[in-house]
Every structure is written in C-alpha cells, then in structure tokens.
Image (cartoon, rainbow, N blue to C red):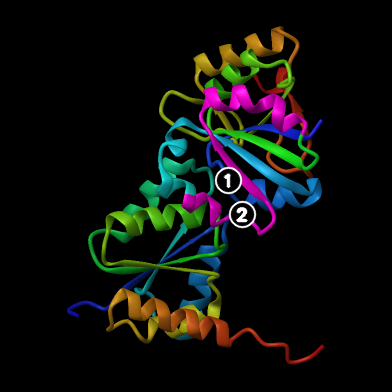
Amino acid sequence: MSIALYRVDDRLIHGQVVVGWGQPLGLGFIVLVDDAVRASAWEQDLYRMGVPTGVEVIFASVAEAARGLEAWQQDPRVGLMLTGDIGSMARLAAASPAVHRINIGGVHHRPGRAEHLRYVYLTEEEVTALRELAARGLDIFAQDVPTARAVPFKEFA
Amino acid sequence: MSEPLRGVVVTHAGLAQSLVAAVVAITGVADALVPVSNDGCDTGALSARIAAAVGREPAVLFVDLPGGSCFTGAVRAARVQSQVAVVSGVNLAMLLDFVFHRDVTPAAAAQRAADAGAKAIRIPAA
C-alpha cells in the first residue's frame, strides 16, 4: 500500500509532517486534501515552499481525492494523505475502504472544542464522527510524531 | 522612519522566547523583538498571534524554518500588511545585527539580517 499514513492535521503541511513523519517514512508524495487550498494557487505555492526537493505535493479537493485514491494506492512511492479536519477525512473514508486507519495528528483549540490530548481538541460533533468511524471498524489513533506513543481512540474520546 | 522597526520572532516551541532572551542578555535592548510561539495553534490561531504581535507598524518577521506553520503564517501576515518583510532561518547572529540597524525599511532590514545570519555560519573546526 503506497499511502502509508492518513492524517488529520489542522496545520496541514508543517514540520511534524515533512520532517517528523517524512524522514522516517521516506515520503515521495503528499496528497493535501483541502477544498480551500485546492482553489487557491497562492496557498498551494506557499505550502510547496515547505517541502523538500523530491517530495511531490498533490493538491486535491475531497471529491478529487476520493476519485484519485485508487491510483495513488498504486504509486510505487510512499505517500501521506492529509486533511485539515475530521469531516473531510470522514468523507474520504466513506468513499473508499482504502482509508482504514486514521492518524489524528493535530486538532487544536477553538471555541466549542474540549481538550482530549495536548494536541487534540474536539467538538461533540467531531467526537461523534470519530465514534462512527471506529464503529465501522476503522482504526483511529492519535499521534503527533512517530516517536510518541500511538494513543488508541478509546483512550482519548 | 519615525520609529525603529520592530522584529517579531515566530518559531516552534520555545525557541523564539529563548532567542529574544539571549538578544536582551547580550545587547541590553529589550524593546526591539517580540517572540511568538506556534504552540497549541492551528493555522488561524497562529495568524492571530502574529497579527497581534505585528500590530499596525512596519516590522520584520523572523521565522525558523523555510516552510511549515510559522513560515506560512508569517507570509500570510506579509500579504495583508505591505510594510512587513519575512526572513527564514532565524539565528542569534541575525537578530543581534537587526536590533542595531532598525532605521531602514523592512525590506532593507530583512536583507541585512539575512546577510548577517548567513555570515555567521562557519566551520571553524572539522
């Protein structure tokens, strides 16, 4: 399977993704799934600046990502799929059984969210969405960087 | 320029606070730099922190990595505030030079700081 990690991270492409995960995984490509970024060439240029030479960044809307998943699974390079919110990842998981294990990498504080871990704050709606994914058999875990312990969903929500 | 430029240091974890503390300890200049950490911030929260630190005056933003949340937040701030320049790869040498050369435009200060920071990288033993 060429996509090694399906990650929810509201900072999208940043140090933990490119260095923390990118180095040990030997990333060859990142699929950044975000409807707003997909619509902005300026935002895409900004995110490309943070990625090392040799790592391709593919920008996709949620609908495009759902259609492209099968092809990316065949890619011989190691890939990482990234969304900025739980809802987008839930939509991808509903569209494809390839999304079977979801890494909650960073969902930070906003009004209406409660702290579950230092780097995971969730609304009641987000907890419910994750519970529904877990009930369908998906493996949900929180882990900001590879050297940290992977916290199973039942331990943080 | 009526007021000397302000520098805003935007970094991961506690690096900005430590760099600013080191500059104050070495120079005694305590009003030139403001530290901003990305700790606990999503994209929107970090942008708000940077905007609050910059205010309405011309400024130079110093960020640690040439990519990532601090970098993207700083470049977004510069996009909406024309008198803001951004330098990546912040180090102590560039900040020490900056605090004594702030009566110029943000672009000129950013270039000078980048040059000073680059000159400080040497290999005196190998």
Does the magenta segment cover residue B2? Answer: no
Q: Position of residue B57 (x, y in %)?
A: 24, 65
Q: CA distance from mark 1 to mark 2?
A: 8 Å
Identify the subunit bearing mark 1.
Answer: A
Q: How many marks?
A: 2
**Residue in the picture at 53% in, 28% down:** A85
**Up-down: is A156 above or below B24?**
above
Residue B38 in view, yes or no: no
Could you tell me if the residues under marks 1 and 2 are in contact, i.e. CB atoms within 8 Å? Answer: yes
Q: Tell me the quarter of the picture where residue A59 sits.
A: top right
Q: Nearer the viewer, mark 1 or mark 2?
A: 2
Discs 1 and 2 share one subunit: yes
Is B81 placed left or right of A74 in the picture?
A: left
Q: Position of residue A103 (x, y in %)?
A: 69, 30
Mark 2: secondary structure: loop
Q: Tell me the quarter of the picture where residue B81 sits.
A: bottom left
Location of mark 2 (residue): A51
Location of mark 1 (residue): A13
Is B94 placed left or right of B50 in the picture?
A: right
Mark 1: secondary structure: loop
Is B112 placed left or right of B116 in the picture?
A: left
Q: Which residues are magenta?
A: A45-74
Does the magenta segment cover residue A63? Answer: yes
* Amino acid type, mark 2: Val
**Up-down: is B102 above or below A101?**
below
Residue A67 in view, yes or no: yes
Of marks 1 and 2, which one's residue comes earlier in the chain? 1
